[in-house]
Image (cartoon, coloured by chain):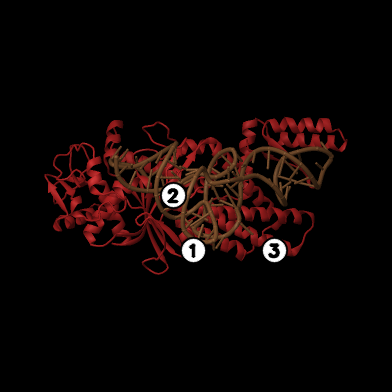
Amino acid sequence: MSLKIYNTFTGKKEEFKPIKQGEAGMYVCGVTLYDRCHLGHARAGVVFDFVFRSLSYLGYKATYVRNFTDVDDKIINRANQRGISTGELVEENLKLFYEDMDALFLKRPTFEPRATKYIDAMQKMIAKLIDKGLAYQVGGDVFYSVSSFREYGKLSKKNTNDLMEGARVEVNEAKRNPLDFALWKDAKPGEPKWDSPWGEGRPGWHIECSAMGREILGETFDIHGGGRDLIFPHHENEIAQSHGASGKPPVNFWMHNGFVNINKEKMSKSLGNFFTIKDVLEKFDPEAVRLYLLSTHYRSPIDFADSYLKEAETHLNRLYMAAVRAEKVLDGKVGEMPEKTRSAFITALEDDFNSAAALAVLNDAANGVNVLCDSLEKNRDEKKISELADLYAGFKEIGGVLGILNRKPADYMANIKAKRLSESGMTGAEIEELIEKRTAARKAKNFAEADQIRDALAEKGIELMDSPGGTTWTAKIL
RNA sequence: GGCACCGUAGCCAAGCGGCAAGGCCGAGGACUGCAAAUCCUUUAUCCCCGGUUCGAAUCCGGGCGGUGCCUCCA
């Protein structure tokens, strides 16, 4: 079998053929550092983190580039509003970005270029486009001439005539064609600016990604990703610029993740229905958020609601419970992922990074772990122990690619128990005392009292579990 | 108006021409003093109508319903 990736450019799932055998270069549009990240950024982040992990797992030497836009209209406007410098605003949001993404267990990309560090590369590219007659200067501005690129609109499946009709009233009269876009913008007072052959100014948004991608990954690289909303005009413009400058297609595979919706509608600031990552993580476990985001294929839209996240928490809890049992029985014994599990998992990954199908393989493994533990808790059987060790190794391996089950199972359980204790206002010792009291009542066959203690604790979200080895408690998922 | 995408169980969701994955909830059973957890079993005229095919959730045509892009947006 081989890896297949859906390519937005062709509209088909295609076999992934890397430029360099065994390697994969991927560029993903990162964020503009002007505000807190929202769930949409979480999805893009998690999706491409999963793609990155999958590529590595499948044996590719993966290079993952995710940029930061640190000079842009939105940044300038926001900084002005708040009366701080653009530099301060950018640094503040950079810190918050990492807080959010680290919480979601995103691996750091191989390279995280910042636009302002690549101004020279952008200028070189712009100069080349002007030389070739694909861009023109008007005063201190430089525009890309869309009509000079025959393939313009191919990625977004639009033709320029339709675009012209749909185009809104153009403010900038200097453009020859309303579709032309800025490569370089004339400096306005108080804005960040750099010297250039066209006077002091700053780069346009689209050229940033073209230049950074090219500098780090080369004139043509394997994969370019981003949210669906970037297809037009951002990625369309990137293709025009990069193809124009180098004379060849810049990207072999275009990947785009679907939106996060709220009540089936796109989440957006203008609708006032957006959630920041911080908002969501205050209420839900970060791995449950990840699990939820990966329960739908990356290209489909995903609807967000508290009830779905609760469902994901229940699911995650079940996975960790299985892990706790396995680790207890195994006591450090390590195995190797069964071939059957591995091949099912790889089949899922190779099918356009089908995380939902991969999750099904994980669930199977969890079920298998529980079945083996059921049996092993009754009587020890060395053959079954090694079977469990193998299956549990597979379970962890899959979790590692999905980026969930990152914590030690015991730590996870301890964590939710601690959370529940603080909510219930009880101490662990108090609960243990009640458990002892109940155990005594049970011994005395005083089941009414025993049940009363159990029910009272249950109301506080504390679940008692009797087993041959004694009674333990856990936090009920509410 | 132009261009895309989507419609699978109570809810979420895979599926890409060959017996309809998985999760959450529900039901029954095993286990338990009773529970919980776990295990086993169980829950689908695949939006509608035509067509192609030995065979269609899947391909084609036509409806109906939903969403997105065409402007900064993950």
Residue A240 in picture, x, y percent from top left:
24, 54
Residue A399 in picture, x, y percent from top left:
56, 54
**Label 3: few (<14), some or many (≥20) within 10 Å?**
some
Which corner quadrant of the image does residue A186 belong to? top left
Amino acid carrying mark 3 in the image: Ser
**Residue linked to disc 1:** A58
Indicate the colour of chain A: red
Can residue A276 be seen by looking at this rendering? Answer: no
Q: Is residue A11 left or right of residue A469?
A: left
- Judging depth in this view, the residue of A62 and A469 nearest the camera is A62
State the mark number for residue A299: 2
User: In the rendered image of this protein, does residue A180 appear above or below residue A354?
Assistant: above
Local secondary structure at mark 2: loop
Residue under the image location 20 percent in, 46 percent down: A180
- Determine whether label 1 and label 2 are within 8 Å by CB: no
Please report whichever mark, 1 or 2, sits nearer to the chain's N-terminal start.
Answer: 1
Amino acid carrying mark 1 in the image: Leu
The brown one among the chains is B
Residue under the image location 25 percent in, 44 percent down: A163
Nearer mark to the viewer, of 1 and 2: 2
Is the same chain shared between marks 1 and 3?
A: yes
